[in-house]
Image (spheres, rainbow, N blue to C red):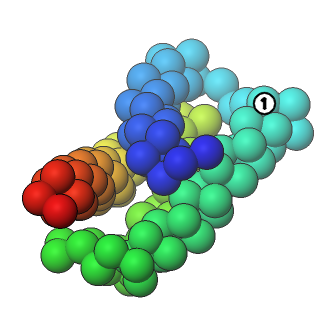
Amino acid sequence: MKLDELTLKLLDECGKCRPRHARMREEEREPDFFAEVKPYADQVHERIAEWQNRSKEWIRQDRPKHVREAQIENAADMMTQFVVQSFYPKTGKKRFYDSIQSVEYLLKTMMTAMKEGADGAKQAKDHQ
């Protein structure tokens, strides 16, 4: 899967975490870790790891202005945590929502940078 597709999938996942957390708070139930949380989280964590590796390659290759490897590391760490936390009603809302917002901002910044990089490469090719 290409980096832009992975980035969009992770953006989508961020969007799913808030309503899942709200639903779990409404239902006031603890999920079955091995039946519900672990299988889902394992799948998402695999995607996060792939995104993290591809993002680092992209940064080294394209050198985007507003994205650094440390941001990728932090976003991957936050996301691996909040995907799991979204299943638990006792997760504090403020920090949880702030983490999601931070990751979403980075993912959107990356999408913009990838688009600008692709447009710039296309224009350079057109002028040759």
Residue 56 position (above or below residue 51): below
Instruction: Locate residue 122 relative to residue 15 in the image: left or right.
Output: left
- Locate residue 59: give its quadrant: bottom left
Q: From where the camera sits, is residue 98 visible?
A: no
The residue lying at 18 percent from left, 72 percent from top is: 66
Q: Nearer the viewer, residue 113 or 18?
A: 113
Disc 1 crowd rating (10 Å Cα; few below 14, some 14-19, many 20+) is: few
Secondary structure found at label 1 = helix
The image quadrant of residue 36 is top right
Q: Quadrant of the N terminus?
A: top right
In the foreground, 5 or 15: 5
| Residue at 71% over, 53% down | 46
Say which residue appears at 54% left-offset and 65% top-offset. 54
Q: Could you tell whether 9 is left or right of 112 in the image?
A: right
The three-letter code of the residue at mark 1 reads: Glu
Depth order, front residue of 41/32: 41
Q: Is residue 14 left or right of residue 34?
A: left
Q: Please name whichever residue, 23 or 75, is drawn nearer the observer in this view of the structure.
A: 75
Counting from the top left corner in percent of width and height, residue 75 is at: 42, 65
Tell me the quarter of the image containing the C terminus: bottom left
- Where residue 33 appears, x then y in whole percent? 81, 40
Q: Which residue is mark 1?
A: 36
81 sits to left or right of 110: right
x%, y% of residue 79? 50, 56
